[in-house]
Image: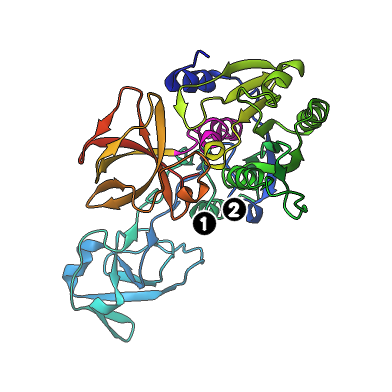
């Protein structure tokens, strides 16, 4: 079988059209963890007027040399101060208050002594001290939060300050997960013989997709029966934007998925990529919906889901990247096991200003070892031309905590 290079498959994936982005409007308090649909743009300056950043007295800086100033009264936060400070005058002004007209500096309470209706300057301050200038936080027209941003506590706070009651967020793409194989038992299902294996793929992948911002649908386990598989896929396509299957894409007698997908009217974008694990992956498109058929082994299906399903989810959410790739230094010798582009479980530790990679406690074996992804694991990428990578070699690593 002729295999597409990893780089070519990623380019084809990037060029796929997913149609118009969809959004919904939610109350601000319900947007945590959602993806912002459009830029948040400031409609005014913050602050809109010079503002006191501490408690003190608003003054003309040049008047500090007088040594003693008259106090006209108080200027509490939230009050609409209309008085104008003239030479030799001051107004007691509190944190967050509008600076009175005519003033240009705030001298802190600690720097003065109060004597009746006057203050004595004990220690002068620099011009403009403790005054927030207009637009210090942001200026009208500034893009404060870019579309595609995952909304966290800071974004919530900024939007609340902007009085954004309702927020446009990207609609979550619906991703259905189907496991195929007569040997697969769903959770809670009774085993009838020791050759059967417990399903984990659909639960692993559903959690992965939900973590990446999608709405995951568990569509169960289907045996190696063409009629059942076709019916299951048709139902999935009717309700999902992306249908992800595991198993049935290799070259065995019971690997039906690769033959069934074209019969559903889907166009195969590519079938077979020179990667390890997961070379039998298949990507197909029907109208503006996608079918991604992954291998059956747990580690293999998870890695290929990261590489080929998460980018589709990101495109549908309007995000620029599905995951983060960083450069790291090898801390131990690595020898490739194939001629393909490999994705090897590793530990990526940020230390001394950069990432370092080792393989401590990572088992070498088949593509079924899902436990290799425990303990904040990452995926080290080694190219087709790589063979032996020595200590100190720079490598690219996919961080699995950045979705």
Compare residues 332 and 129 and report the one nearer the observer. 332
| Residue extent of the magenta highlight | 303-323
Residue drawn at x 25%, y 34% is: 389
Residue 333 in which image quadrant:
top left
Name the N-terminal-most of marks 1 and 2: 2
- Residue 369 lies, in percent from the top left, at 50, 46
- Where 215 sits versus 64, above or below? above
Residue drawn at x 41%, y 69% is: 95
Between the C-alphas of marks 1 and 2, the distance is: 7 Å
Compare residues 85 and 345 and report the one nearer the observer. 345
Contact (CB < 8 A) between labels 1 and 2? yes
Task: List the residue tagged with mark 2.
Answer: 32
Callout 2: 10 Å neighbours few (<14), some, many (20+)?
A: few
Q: Secondary structure at mark 1?
A: helix
- Residue 183 lies, in percent from the top left, at 70, 40
In the picture, measured across the screen, residue 5 lies left or right of residue 256, that is left
Compare residues 226 and 400 and report the one nearer the observer. 226
- Where 123 sits versus 283, above or below? below
Task: List the residue tagged with mark 1.
Answer: 153
Q: Residue furthest top?
A: 2
Residue 313 within the magenta-colored segment of the rendering? yes
């Amino acid at each position: 079988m002729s295999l597409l290079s990893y780089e070519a498959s990623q380019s084809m994936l990037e060029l796929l059209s997913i149609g118009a982005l969809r959004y919904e409007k939610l109350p601000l308090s319900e947007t945590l963890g959602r993806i912002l649909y459009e830029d948040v743009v400031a409609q005014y300056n913050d602050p809109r007027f010079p503002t006191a950043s501490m408690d003190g007295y608003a003054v003309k800086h040049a008047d500090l040399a007088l040594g003693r100033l008259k106090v006209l009264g108080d200027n509490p936060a939230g009050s609409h101060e209309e008085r104008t400070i003239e030479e030799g005058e001051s107004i007691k002004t509190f944190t967050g208050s509008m600076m009175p007209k005519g003033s240009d500096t705030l001298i802190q309470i600690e720097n003065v002594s109060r004597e009746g209706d006057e203050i004595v300057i004990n220690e002068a301050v620099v011009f403009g001290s403790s005054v927030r200038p207009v637009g210090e936080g942001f200026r009208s027209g500034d893009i404060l939060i870019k579309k595609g941003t995952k909304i966290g506590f800071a974004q919530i706070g900024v939007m609340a300050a902007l009085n954004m009651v309702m927020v446009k967020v990207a609609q979550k793409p619906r991703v259905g997960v189907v496991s195929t194989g007569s040997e697969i038992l769903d959770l809670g299902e009774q085993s009838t013989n020791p050759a059967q294996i417990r399903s984990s793929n659909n639960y692993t992948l559903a959690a992965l997709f939900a973590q990446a911002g999608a709405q995951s649908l568990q569509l169960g386990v289907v045996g190696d029966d063409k009629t059942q598989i076709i019916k299951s896929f048709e139902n999935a396509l009717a309700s999902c934007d992306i249908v992800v299957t595991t198993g049935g894409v290799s070259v065995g007698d019971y690997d039906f998925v690769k033959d069934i997908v074209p019969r559903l009217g889907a166009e195969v974008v590519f079938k077979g990529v020179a990667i390890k694990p997961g070379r039998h992956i298949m990507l197909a498109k029907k109208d503006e919906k996608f079918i991604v058929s992954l291998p059956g082994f747990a580690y293999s299906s998870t890695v290929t889901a990261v590489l080929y399903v998460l980018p589709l989810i990101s495109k549908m959410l309007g995000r620029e990247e599905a995951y983060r790739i960083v450069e790291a230094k090898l801390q131990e010798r690595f020898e490739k096991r194939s001629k393909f582009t490999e994705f090897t479980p590793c530990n990526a530790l940020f230390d001394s200003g950069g990432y370092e990679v080792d393989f401590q406690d990572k088992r070498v074996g088949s593509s079924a070892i899902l436990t290799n992804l425990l303990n904040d694991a990452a995926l080290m990428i080694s190219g087709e031309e790589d063979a032996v990578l020595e200590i100190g070699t720079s490598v690219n690593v996919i961080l699995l905590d950045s979705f």
